[in-house]
Image (cartoon, rainbow, N blue to C red):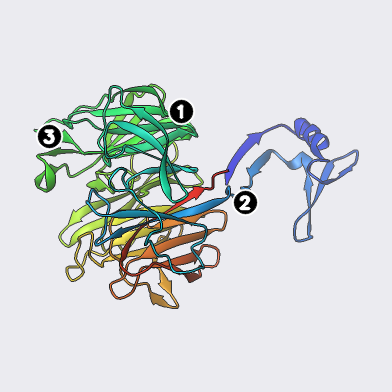
Amino acid sequence: MIKKTTKINKMVMKRFILTFVAAMTMCLTLSAQQYVMKITKADGTVVELNADEITNVSFVNIAEPIVLAPHHFDLTVTVGKQGGMGRDVTTIVQSRDRLDSGAEVDFKNVGAEINTTYTMESIVRGKFYYQVPVSEDRFVKLQFKDNQMKVVQAQPFRENTYNCRQYTHTWLNDNTLLIMAANGDKNAIIWTKLNTDDMSIISEGTLGISLASGGWDSFTTSGVLTYRKSDNKLFYFYYNKKGTGRKATKEDKFHVAVINAETMAVEQDNLSPFAAETAGSAYGELLQQTTFFDEQDNLYIAAFSDTSIGEEGKLLRIKKGEFNIDADFNGFPNSDGKLLTTQYLGNGKVFCYSRHDDSTLGTTIDSYAHYYSIVDLKANTRTRMAFNGTDIPYSSGRFSQRSAFDAGENKVYFGVNTETAQPQIYVYDVKTGNVSEGIKVAEGYYFEQIRLLEDDK
């Protein structure tokens, strides 16, 4: 809820009341001495206000119910093992109208294999997918229709070139998409703005960020990028490193670069002392969501630090109008491992997917060590998702958005690959807190993603 307060004098207040009385459906009584408002509340009680005693008026915007366009779900599974993160594995997509009921989902002769031409790592908005395909020579706008992935438009690279899977992004408005990544030598950060109406390149360039002194020789592959509309600022989370691959040495703190979204000038480059790395630094938010804004315009970012027992997940915050990480806040309490994905559900509730870093469970992509929980930012609590009073078993599969939030229904659909049962989709009712079983996925497939897309008109 957004609240704005304006001071006005008594005479202006009287005129204001008389002018807007009809629209506000108030009963106004006028005497020689005072102006009195009688306001009937929803519960039938009446409140009287003396206009001569009012010095401030608060205008409150009450959020309208969210109504989504007609939509469906695209399910992604793999065959043989978990996918994503560049794994060479058969990847199949299928569209479904409903996930809360219906027959078991089988992918045999239904859906389309996409891994040979496109990637599971993709940007989704409205009814389209956007990505750099396997050919790594263009940007493509795709639509999964009639269980086929179809090219709507394509834009060959012009100056800046990108690898598939290895870039980050944010939306500046409904049709302006910003792509960003380390260049081929990983010694600079490049960016490209696209008009997604026709996929034309609006502009492109290189960020004014240099490698840190002290022998650091490369940037993280993608980093994480997000946009704060209220002041037209971009926030780019990245770090420096030495060497390549798993043996590379990383900075022990990540950077928060603040960028003017119009000019792309870097205005600040701050270090975060509260975590080593943001979740998804290698793949941006192509597989999963790790950033969000709440109703007060506070920015949140999933991150983690290395500890003696594994990786400690954190949910960090940058307050409205500020540019540094809030030192007094961590929204992921009682962390027992890496925070992987987040989805903001409104009213301070966050749907999280994380890994339990226990030596008996393992920490690989295929380890049955991952689970869902609800974070209450107001109460600073975290509750593991359960069904019929029992915690939902650990799932395999690491980075990937295995959940979809239907804001119109106020429900979350999420899937698991448990060790002793076939893949199962559950439905979480945000209002009631109830969890119910949705449809099952046939044996032999590994559940990977749920994407919510608008229907084709």
- As displayed, is residue 156 above or below residue 367? above
- As displayed, is residue 103 above or below residue 119? below
Mark 3 or 1: in front is 1
Disc 3 on helix, strand or loop? loop
Circle 2/circle 1 CB separation < 8 Å: no
Locate the C terminus and report the quarter of the image it occupies: top right
- As displayed, is residue 351 above or below residue 18? below
- Residue appearing at x 43%, y 78% in the figure: 389
Left-right relation of 233 to 355: right
- Residue appearing at x 22%, y 51% in the figure: 88
Left-right relation of 56 to 276: right
Label 2 – label 1 distance at C-alpha:
32 Å
Residue denoted by label 3 = 216
Residue denoted by label 2 = 65
Disc 2 on helix, strand or loop? loop
Q: Residue 433, percent across and down? A: 50, 67
Q: Earlier in the sequence, mark 3 or mark 1?
A: 1
Could you tell me the amino acid type at mark 3?
Answer: Trp
Left-right relation of 350 to 56: left
Could you tell me the amino acid type at mark 1?
Answer: Asp
Residue denoted by label 1 = 198
